[in-house]
Amino acid sequence: MPGIAKLQPHSELPQLLDDVEVRVYAAGRFRIQLEIPKTSTLSEQDIEKILKISSWEINPDKVADGYEGGRSVLLLRESPIVKGRIELPSLQVSGIGFREIDFSGKLPTTNEGFCPPSSENFMSRVPKTVMGTSYAKGTELKAHRPAYLPMGTYTSSGLLKKVENTQKVAELGLENMVVPHVEAYGRYLDAELQNEEGPFGFIVLPSPDPKKPRAANDFFGPFCKAVGKGNRVGTDAAMAFYYGLSPYIAVMANGLRELHDKGRLVHLQTHLENFYVINGKPYVVDWTTMKRLGENVEENILNRVIDLKRPTDDFGDIFSKVFPNVPEEVKAGIVMLVEEASMEVYSGHPEKEIKLLSIVNRQRPDLRKRMTEFDAMVQWMKDEGIEGYCERKEDISMPPPDSGKKSKQWRAALLRKGSTK
């Protein structure tokens, strides 16, 4: 096929994975070494598109069917595939360039125009509160934020981690969460696109329809249109926000329980812009931050809670931007409701009501005063017998008589207080 490099008997770089087909392409602005795993479902037509846009023989803007985030191009593939009953008609090619990201709005937005990758430090343009990852080490909570990421592409170590982690989790065969396999990955052979680690690179993954947004925008776009038309104002808008976005978080909670138990893995970046919700399942794309649960049960519990709480923290951040006049204590109460709903799904018994305040109130007075919602979630997981802890025999999840009615009244009161009328 014209434009496609012949299979090379010896690649210019060592292969990242075994059992891959290697192609070296030198017709564009950048020279590419593309590696295609035996499990790939790419057609020759798909490969040709990938080589031409990743090498910048063709500007990706000219053929892109969509974009995802700041450094991913979406291409409709020759033939759709299906994973976990989710149709995936496109490809996400991530790491071949970038669009500028604006972090000043309610959600990050990207400007038009895709630019070639470069060695410039992307982190110098990102707010210091963005792109950090929390995790537990022993009994301590730590945070990691990369000091350097190249513009629109991945370092050698970042690419290797992304490829290996994605392949590893794809092999688990999860039922409540769908994850991609690696269709291909590539590395640049040009001196300008490398650092002391080695060459920068990109990855190709199967993706949903380019018109399908990820969880945050899937809800937020229609919500803003409805509010903008005056269909919901004040209390109605707050209720619509709570009831509209909560199901996305619940779906993720269901998938995370299986990932934690069956896969013995945590994702650690389960924010609302990192997954799609399709046919009642989360389709989770980015596995760079994945961590394996080990022998330290306390550490495992903490990492489970970080995973479970991450989407609700995202909910709270977006809620604050949408309803800036809502008192902080009211926002905190609504976020707590989302956390409790997420815990109920994670428990496997969503019919049983969980109240974080009940967990706090049964602790010793000295502990109760300094106990956070995170601490209460940790205690709840231990009481559930997760990670081998002794299960609390008393069913703390079952509400006392009439508490369901009181809970509904409390939720309504919170939303009334949060009215922006």
Image (cartoon, rainbow, N blue to C red):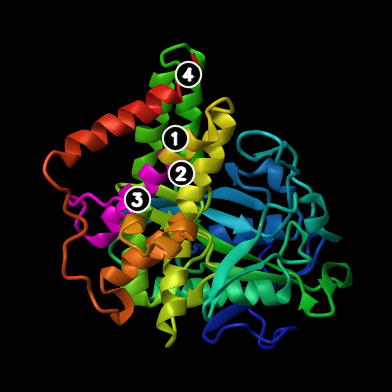
Q: Position of residue 188 (x, y in %)?
A: 76, 70
Q: Position of residue 305 (x, y in %)?
A: 43, 64
Q: Earlier in the sequence, mark 2 or mark 3?
A: 2
The answer for how far apart the CA atoms under marks 4 and 1 are is 12 Å
The answer for how far apart the CA atoms under marks 3 and 1 are is 29 Å
Q: Answer yes or no: do the residues labelled 1 and 2 have beta carbons within 8 Å? A: yes
> Which mark's residue is nearer the viewer, 4 or 1?
4
Q: Which residues are magenta?
A: 334-358
Q: Answer yes or no: do the residues labelled 4 and 3 have beta carbons within 8 Å? A: no
**Disc 4 target residue:** 227
The amino acid pointed to by label 2 is Ala
**Disc 2 target residue:** 215
> Which mark's residue is nearer the viewer, 3 or 1?
3
Q: Earlier in the sequence, mark 4 or mark 2?
A: 2
The amino acid pointed to by label 1 is Phe
Q: Secondary structure at mark 1?
A: helix
Q: Earlier in the sequence, mark 4 or mark 1?
A: 1
Q: Is residue 56 above or below residue 338?
A: below
Q: Can residue 359 be seen in the rendering of this structure? A: yes
**Disc 3 target residue:** 357
Q: Is residue 81 above or below residue 113?
A: below
